[in-house]
Amino acid sequence: MRRRTFVSTIGSGAALGLAGCLTQDGDSDDTDDGTLTVVTYESMVDGENPAGPWLKEAFEAEYPDAELEWELLPDQGISHYIGEAERDISIEADVYLGLNIDDLVRIDDNLDEGGLFRELDHDRIERASRIRDGLDMGDPHGRVLAYDTGYISLVYDESEVDEPETFDALTEPEYEDALLAQNAQSSDPGQAFLLWTIDAFGEDGYLDYWQALEENGVRVLEDWTESYYGAYMNEERPMVVSYSTDQVFASAEGNDLTRHQIAFPNDQGYANPEGMGIFEDATSVDLAYEFLDFVLTNDAQAEIAQRNVQFPAVEDEYVDLDDEFDQYAHVPPEAVTVGYDELQGNLDGWVDDWAREFASQ
Amino acid sequence: MSLGDRIAADRGRLSALLERHVLWLTALLMAGVLGVMLYVPVGVVFGNAVLEDGVPTLSHVADVLTDPFYFGAVADVFADPLAIGTHLGSLAAWLGAVSITLSLEYPLPGVDLPVPWLALETPGVRKGLFGFTAYQAALSTVASVALGLPAAYILANYEFHGRRTLRSLTILPFVLPGIMVAVGFYAMFGQTGTLNTLLGTVGLGPFAFIETNPLAIVILAHAFYNAPLVARLTVAAWESVDVRTVETARSLGASKRRAFRDVVVPQLAPAVLTGALLTFIFTFMTFPIVLALGGLQLATVEVWIYDRIQRLDYTEAATLAILETILSLGLTYAYLRYESAQAGFSQAASRPTRESLVPDLRTTLSPRRLAIFTYGLVALVVFVGPMASLVVGSFTDGSGVTLRNYAFLLERQLEGESFQTLPLPAIRNSLVFGVATLVIAVPMGVVLSVLTVRAGRSGTVIDTLAMLPLAVSGVVFGIGLLQGLVFGISLPGGWRLQMTGAVAIVVAHAVAAYPFVTRNVSPMLANLDPAMVESARALGASRFRALVDVELPLVVNGIVAGAAFAFAISIGEFSSTVILASGSESYTMPVAVERYLGRRSGPAIAMGTLLLAVTAASFVVIDRVGGRADR
Amino acid sequence: MTELRLEGVSKQYGTDAGGTTALAGIDLTVRDGEFFTLVGPSGCGKTTTLRTIAGFEEPTDGTVSFDGTPMTGVAPEKRDVGVVFQSYGLFPHMTVAENVGYGLRFRDPPEGTTVDERVAALLELVDLERMGERNPDQLSGGQQQRVALARALAPEPDLLLLDEPMSALDARLRESLRRQLTQIQSTLGVTTVYITHDQQEALAISDRVAVMSNGRIEQVATPQEIYREPSTRFVAEFVGENNVFDGTVRTRDGDRAHVDVDGTTFELAGPSLPADGQQTSFCVRPTALTRGVEQNQLSVTLETCEFRGEHVRAYGRWNGTAVVLQLDTVPEGEAVSVGFEPAAAHVVTSQ
């Protein structure tokens, strides 16, 4: 399939000594030719035992005339597509698997309200009703459906510290120099943890709380990998902001679970639902709807959950998980999440105020 | 004249014409490449800072300059530069509050050894983001030079088994992705890291190396990257020191120490300063190692640029990046003025001989040798430690030794789908891009050197501007490539010129790499007697032939050294590669490392180990083949 | 062979206002086969003149022509000149023979000879027959200088340019090389421009000499004329040692004139003397200012004396003016009376 006419790779570029390609608007052929292009993040296709290849195979088996093409999410994430849309470049992909609430906020802050993705017609997604309550991602424009979720929690070493019952406990001497967190500017769990504290202490109180955390010696590292695989696993500190599925990996790795205890302060966990949506420019719209519906089937939900180590988006009755998964993947008593309405117009300010609290003092 | 003769004559004229203008043609081509791959993309981003709806404005720059968050105490001065009395008043107040105290301190944690400590108590000055960034860069530069110079001294002056291989391997830290360095440092210096494990076997520790002083660890990590750079540049200069000048000084009555100070040091200074300058610029724009090891308290300007880009606030990102670039280019210009003033040392006619490092037991136990071995131990901990720990980490998991990470790579290679990232294509792409980068970057760098070396002040200005790839924030360069090349440049008629994939990656690598060629070649070229080129030209050689016949053979050491850096830059480059490779199969080893990074880090670390192994092998080969000039 | 002509050649560095003038209008003709020397103090523009002739610098104004063909815009490699630099510019990565043969990569050797033969012939010409396989840094300074000469001569240049080729060598070696150079030059008959700051050397080896100062030519003449009849005060003082007196012509009668210098009247004889009442300067060589001459007496207070073997050079003052004398013996006492013949004085212009 070639949606673009490659006019020249040599002719135009040779003058500059570079090979480029010239494309003209309106070159795209807009027919639905049975190929579905799905954008997704790296671990869906490139990680260890990822769900992506299974999804492709199973989907193509279900729809023999269709072909699923994975497209890796560019490095800039959603900003890449916002940039293309701003320049009226037609987006080739049909579906995006991995959409977050703050992606939607970012879209609406930079493009027309409700842009980039289509409003989903739930009548065309039979299994949409299976999605659990509380995983409605709150988009007023109805562009997204959750397909899985993770919960941010604390992971701690029970031989060194007791389980922190509340957020306030983390500011007490017992947890001095104990906590590792991530930079909310650049890390997903980092931002989720920050939003969780905003949910707990309110817009006016979260900075005071973080000041108390800072005085108690919290360390904010760049990203999850450094904080977890770097600092936490080398026993720099006894507690880290991480995922509630931690024990699934730890047991598979053969680790002693002493250092892999899950804590839900305030009996909460912060839910990070991952959603899917259909691009406005999508050409294979029918197939895209079939795919969204397919992702919510029992089998697909189980495979995504177990391979990606996330929780299914559908109610328990619509998915069968291995006992082992149930044993090691912990669900918080209460899931909190800061919804679209609150995030919009606030997120950047919250994060920036928080970051300035730490840097350059 | 027959037609054939005429064609032959025409062809002869044409080739003569080409030969005469080849330097300028190359320069023109280079300007084109730089325009498309550097100036346009970076200019597009920078435009956000100084244009408001197409109208030039300095208000964004002023906003940043007067924000105490960015410029600390200096922001007041920028805000009201004419209130000199007020500023002097606050300076005087600050000086009045400085106190000096003498006390007993226990500098070694857990060791009861008091040391008299002269403490300088200064009231806190708000450094601001820029101030702190410069502060940690300055400390990192000092540390890199301090750790790099002894290595250069040993590699240039002593002979020992494996010296050349060791010299080749000093490039390794250069190609390691930031995340791998962070993981390696934790694996080496963490509470359960390799170092504490080793100390534990003799009953010491464990020490909280990282927790005790995160800034020190960040600086050490910067030295891990940059000390080898300083060492490589200095070794090359040391090997070019003309021993006759030393002998002359000795014969004139200078002691060994004095001769070193008066004769050797001035000949090494340009190389050391080049290394220091590059280190300062790199560590000024450091990212993301500060946050990976140190934490958000140690955030630098680049961290903020990245954040602003992520939030699509290009105005502030570009403003910060412009200030960063102005600072870097300013330093570069100052250095280049110095470098051009230093020109004139002769090419080494007689090179120094190397002493055997371990000739006999008595010499081996001399204080100098013991100092060398102590340094060797430090180098082992700082440089080898993190890499070795990384390699060990790729072979272990919670239950002990395992090959599962490599089994993953093998399985991915054998059974991977076309949309997945496979190890062998990543290795192949890295090597092919590396070689292709050499083919472009070496001529670019050499031509730039030739055209600027003797062109006086205007040459220095051009040379400075040509160093832009080093002075531009990597994040900004990446976003510029995305906006300029990946999204494409709009042309009339609804057409759009886009450039991605292998060719664009290679050219982007070459743009990042050629300054290293220039910085290695220019000082050597400047040291050549201009009478050689002029003699050649009077004898009938065109400027180009004189370059090929006379200058290039005499600066081949510099070219080889620059080429090694260029290759390493290409192998290690991540930020622009990942942008240009998206949607194609042009991914490289560092990109593969990043893509394999998931909730389990094993596969990525195994890929990182592969990256180290492939790079090490390439450099041993490169230095063996290309280093025939080296003894 | 070639006649070299410079017409109104000037060279300006930088812009008009802040620039410096290296050459301020040089007019010069070097005849075919001539050994021509440019001499002057450092910074006088002689090297710039040579580089302009070779084509390394383009003149700001004026033309350089070889045998009437203007060389404007002609690249150095197209000019057929041989150049020997002060630092020789030998290629350290090539052997002596490769150095000498380098120019033959671009220009054919003389008809009937091969490149190797030509190289051998030139090495023989400069007495370095057995040095062909050595590297330049294995040779002594004098040998290196001869290699540079052989290299410049190998392609049979129309013009040979030598830029202070001897300045790095010791005095004794210079003299022998100088003889060898003039011999080779007259054998080959190649038009030669030689640059030096050493006026003795210039006088010793040249057919004609041009004295330069401040980007201008002061005088062009044979060595004898330059020495005996310097046309300007600068030439008089620069070439050899000289005593210059400034005064006013009191009377002039044909080829005799009386000139007042600080209240003392001197008699001068010779052609082209200045007219009554004019300010004038004249010079008298130390050799002409001697004891035992009755005319034009002056009493010189001595400051230092140097014994130079065949004679004594004495430095002193007369009426505050520095004076240098050549005497047979070291004088006794603090003052000495000397005089000069009216015809020994030579009038110079102050410009």
Image: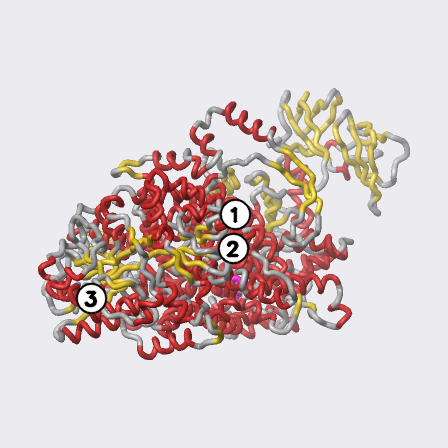
Q: Quadrant of residue A205?
A: top left
**Residue B605 pos. (x, y %):** 43, 68
Determine the residue positioned at 63% across, 23% down. C278
**Pick the front one: A354 or C256:** A354
Alpha-carbon neighbours of circle 3 within 10 Å: few (<14), some, or many (≥20)?
few
Residue in front for this viewpoint, B623 or C200: B623
Q: Which amino acid lies under the numbered mark 1 shown in the image of this protein? A: Gln
Q: Are marks 2 and 3 on the same chain?
A: no
Does the magenta segment cover residue B557? yes
Residue beneath disc 3: A317
Q: Quick check: C191 left or right of A265?
A: right
The kind of residue on which mark 2 rests is His
Q: Label 1: which residue?
A: B136
Q: Nearer the viewer, mark 2 or mark 3?
A: 3
Marks 1 and 3 on same chain: no
Direction right: furthest residue: C332
- Residues at badges 1 and 3 in contact (C-beta under 8 Å)? no
User: What's the distance in space between the residues labelled 2 and 1, CA to CA?
Assistant: 10 Å
In which quadrant is the N terminus of chain A drawn?
A: bottom left
Does residue A147 appear to the left or right of A157 in the view shown?
left
Q: CA distance from mark 2 to mark 3?
A: 53 Å
**What kind of element bears circle 3?**
helix
Chain letter for mark 1, please: B
> On residue A266, which mark appears?
none
Residue B222 — which label? Answer: 2
Q: Which residues are the magenta region?
A: B551-559
Colour pattern: secondary structure
